[in-house]
Amino acid sequence: MINSFNEISILKPDDWHLHLRDGKILKGVVSYTANVFSRAIIMPNLDPPITTLNSAKEYKKRIIQAIPKGASFTPLMTAYLTDDMSPEVLERGFKEGIFYGAKLYPVNVTTNSSYGVTDLNKIDNLFETMERIGMPLLIHGEVSDLDVDVFDREAVFIERHLEPLLRRFSSLRVVLEHITTIDAIDFVENSKSNIAATITPHHLHINRNAMFLGGLRSDFYCLPTAKREIHRIALRKAATSGKACFFLGTDSAPHTRKFKESSCGCAGIFNAPFALESYLKVFEEENALSRFEAFASINGANFYGLPLNIEKISLVKKDIFVPKSINVGLEGDPNDSVKPFHSGEILGWSIAAN
Ligand code: DOR
Ligand code: ZN
């Protein structure tokens, strides 16, 4: 509900795509999500990845231990698909509420994906099970073939792999994660209601030029990479359209300075600290404040078949300064801080104190 031009109040949002990492950094990053969002789909790309019921349960416990006191936040765990994952583990995990979905990383496509799937045809037994039990398949939709241009990898994945997969398993429930192209938008919009997509804040704000502005800027490097401006404009239209097939998934992916400022910098943008404010700026600019709640708090829960949150959250029109860097509790070494998305900028909306 928009109470006035200066305030918006919505059901508490959920983040349908989040990297929390593990160990010390987990404690340093989880509060940014847990203080604002009610639930989040937790990515399983640890090293080693989350492939068993036990490792998912243990990781969930570590996340819960790291949540600040007073926050009510539920991590929704996912399984990492490998060539030899057993269908029984997926089925049991889903039916027992341990896994809310399974993540498909084509092998070597991104951070910690070397355990990923080498050929989609090899795991038809898993797709069959997931289709039968209604378990969501969350897809990093890019090919990793080195002969495919990095900016074409999403479009090529859709044509070469996703369309054939859905011809074989037409009722599979699929979330195409962090979409970046008009090709992906068209694909999702023209599919049945079993296909949806998450959209990140960074892909709504930056195009591929951001990575090269005055020098090589690894802080804007993520996968899939941002694309041309026409794609960014189309993503903003899709996200703010109110359509049920598009919902919030930050893909917040923290990497410390050491790993960003390297001759081979890691892919990932840490947007969790100001994610909601960042999305809201886009909705305001697109004159779509009345559709913000659907994107942030309703469409995702409906797709996953989960109840809507009951609590509310308000944002007020008040400037907020985004710090240049954030210490995530790693011994205070400046090389071990993380740069948040919008670092050093002022955003025009702030979360209202309860
Ligand atoms: O930019 C990204 N970072 N994309 C991914 O797919 C993985 C993520 C990470 O884990 O760092
Ligand atoms: Zn991700």
Image (cartoon, helix red, strand yellow):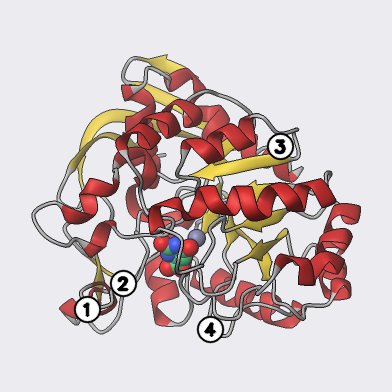
- Secondary structure, mark 3, is helix
Task: Look at mark 2 in the image and give the residue it sits on.
Answer: 328
Residue at the outermost left position: 214
Rendered image quadrant of residue 253: bottom left
Of labels 1 and 3, earlier in sequence is 1
Q: Residues within 10 Å of mark 2 (few under 14, many from 20)?
A: many
Of badges 4 and 2, nearer the viewer stands 4
Instruction: Tell me the CA gap for discs 1 and 4.
Output: 22 Å
| Residue at image coords 70%, 47% | 163
How far apart are the alpha carbons under marks 1 and 3? 42 Å
Per the rendering, the mark at residue 47 is 4
Measured Cα–Cα span from mark 3 to mark 2: 33 Å
**Horizontal placement of 315 versus 290: left or right?**
left
184 in relation to 169, above or below: above
Between 68 and 14, the residue placed more toward the observer is 14
At mark 1, the secondary structure is loop
Determine if residue 298 is in view: no
Residue that lies at the very extreme toward the top in this rendered image: 4
Query: Of discs 1 and 4, which sits in the foreground?
Result: 1
Q: Assess whether mark 3 and mark 1 are in contact (beta carbons under 8 angstroms).
A: no
* Residue that numbered label 1 is attached to: 263
Earlier sequence position, callout 3 versus callout 2: 3
Tag 4 and tag 2, C-beta contact below 8 Å: no
Amino acid type shown at disc 4: Asp
Tell me where residue 71 appears, x and y as whole percent.
Answer: 50, 56
Measuring from the top left, give residue 94's x and y in whole percent.
Answer: 81, 62
Within 8 Å: ligand 1 and the Cβ of disc 2? Answer: no
* Residue at (42% x, 58% y) in the render: 252
Label 3: few (<14), some or many (≥20) within 10 Å? some
The residue tagged 3 is 302
